[in-house]
Image: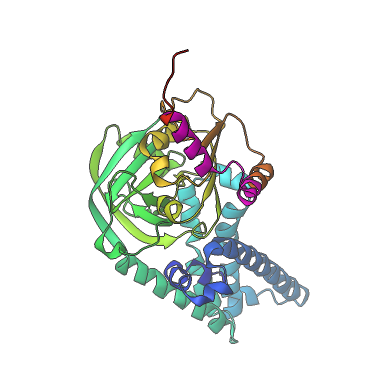
């Protein structure tokens, strides 16, 4: 499962089949983390007890004189480099994402070493999942990559970049709540980064990304986009997110990928309620000025919890179903309140819109 969980194209396809009724393909990254942690612990403990047994039997020479010893040493040596920077918070804070991602690719060395580790079924247990992952990776790299010749880049606020582009022809009937991997050759030809994608609010058949400056790559992107411009962009995907079928969407801005707080197409079809926690004032202002919430939905709640420092510069008229708070949310109380209001039918957003229409149509009378 450690390899299969990262076969993005396969998982994306299976998520559209009946298999999804038994397996949650929307949260395969969690599966990958769990199995990666288990395999990392097992690899190190297995190596330790082998060394202990060989040492007690005066057979340590097997470490460099046998295939099992050499391949086991290689696997044990690279395992901490693969796992620890992704697991331990103090290492994650001190090592850049680019370095940690590069070290993670040592899994190739780990897998090849274990293929020759012992004359048992381990070759099949490692080889078949690794082969599935490799085929999936090659298929995605060559078949689902698209060059966007004229992607439009612009800054928003003090710390973010918005990217707009026309959907490639191969994206017809793709799920709107998706994420993509992008590569900007004018920054690095070797780095692909995942970002949430959502429909462009002002143009049909266009998509948009909101990218906050957090890591080295995103900060370099922010430095290069000093003014609105057109640049080349490679896009791999789209891939469905775990939020595609949620009735209540929560979003935060802590990572450099700002998720779409208002999933437009889904809001048009379902009652999708949003709880958005954000401390970036520029992002909130950008979204509220760009997106016509009342034109998308009038039957959903949108709660924005702003935790930044400066005062927000909000639009003059906000839709009645948007509520903005200058505090952190009590998620449990907020969600139960939304559910209670929907089930009771009291204070629904569509009722608030009707009341506002009645007030607007009421003729003004001078007493």
Q: Position of residue 126 (x, y in %)?
A: 54, 78
As displayed, is residue 233 above or below residue 358? below
Q: Residue at x 57, y 64 (%)?
A: 32
- Residue 66 appears in the rendering: no
Residue 316 location, quadrant: top left
Residue 223 location, quadrant: top left
Q: Residue furthest right?
A: 56
Residue 218 location, quadrant: top left
Q: Position of residue 224 (x, y in %)?
A: 30, 37
As displayed, is residue 288 above or below residue 338? above
Q: How many labels does the image show?
A: 0
Q: Where is residue 237 in the image (x, y as percent from the top left)?
A: 37, 61
Q: Residue at x 53, y 80 (%)?
A: 116
Q: Which of 323 and 250 is in front in this view?
A: 323
As displayed, is residue 197 above or below residue 223? below
**Horizontal placement of 330 versus 137: left or right?**
right
**What's the magenta region?**
338-360
Q: Which of 127 and 237 is in front in this view?
A: 237
**Horizontal placement of 208 versus 319: left or right?**
left
Q: Residue furthest top?
A: 367
Q: Which residue is drawn at 53% across and 76% down?
A: 19
Q: How is the image coloured?
A: rainbow
Q: Is the magenta stretch mostly helix, strand or loop?
A: helix
Q: Nearer the viewer, residue 143 or 273?
A: 273
The answer to if 343 sits in the magenta stretch is yes
Q: Which residue is drawn at 53% across and 33% down?
A: 279
The answer to if 231 sits in the magenta stretch is no
User: Where, quadrant-wise, is the N terminus in this rendering?
Assistant: bottom right
Q: Where is residue 319 in the image (x, y as percent from the top left)?
A: 45, 35
- Residue 296 appears in the rendering: yes
């Amino acid at each position: 499962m450690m390899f299969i969980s990262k076969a993005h194209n396969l998982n994306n396809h299976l998520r559209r089949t009946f298999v999804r009724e038994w397996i949650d393909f929307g949260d395969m990254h969690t599966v990958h983390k769990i199995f990666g942690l288990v395999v990392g612990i097992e690899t190190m403990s297995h190596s330790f007890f082998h060394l202990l047994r060989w040492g007690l039997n005066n057979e340590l020479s097997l470490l460099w004189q046998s295939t099992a010893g050499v391949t086991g040493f290689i696997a044990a040596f690279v395992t901490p480099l693969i796992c620890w920077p992704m697991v331990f918070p103090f290492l994650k804070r001190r090592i850049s994402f680019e370095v940690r991602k590069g070290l993670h690719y040592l899994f190739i060395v780990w897998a090849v070493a274990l293929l020759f580790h012992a004359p048992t079924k381990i070759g099949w247990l490692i080889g078949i999942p690794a082969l599935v992952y490799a085929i999936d990776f090659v298929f995605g790299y060559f078949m689902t990559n698209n060059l966007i010749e004229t992607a439009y880049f612009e800054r928003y606020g003090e710390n973010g970049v918005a990217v707009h582009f026309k959907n490639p022809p191969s994206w017809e009937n793709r799920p709107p709540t998706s994420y993509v991997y992008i590569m900007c050759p004018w920054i690095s030809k070797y780095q692909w980064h995942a970002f949430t994608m959502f429909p462009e609010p002002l143009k049909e058949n266009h998509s948009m990304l909101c990218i906050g400056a957090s890591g080295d790559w995103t900060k370099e992107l922010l430095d290069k986009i000093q003014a609105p411009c057109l640049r080349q962009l490679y896009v791999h995907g789209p891939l469905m997110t775990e939020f595609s079928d949620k009735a209540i969407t929560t979003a935060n801005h802590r990572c450099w990928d700002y998720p779409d707080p208002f999933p437009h197409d889904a809001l048009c079809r379902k009652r999708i309620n949003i709880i958005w926690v954000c401390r970036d004032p520029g992002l909130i202002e950008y979204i509220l000025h760009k997106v016509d919430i009342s034109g998308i939905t009038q039957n959903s709640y949108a709660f924005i919890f702003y935790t930044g420092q400066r005062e927000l510069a909000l639009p003059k008229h906000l839709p009645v179903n948007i509520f903005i708070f200058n505090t952190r949310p009590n998620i449990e109380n907020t969600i139960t309140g939304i559910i209670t209001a929907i089930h009771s039918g009291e204070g629904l957003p569509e009722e608030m819109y009707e009341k506002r229409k009645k007030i607007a149509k009421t003729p003004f009378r001078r007493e």
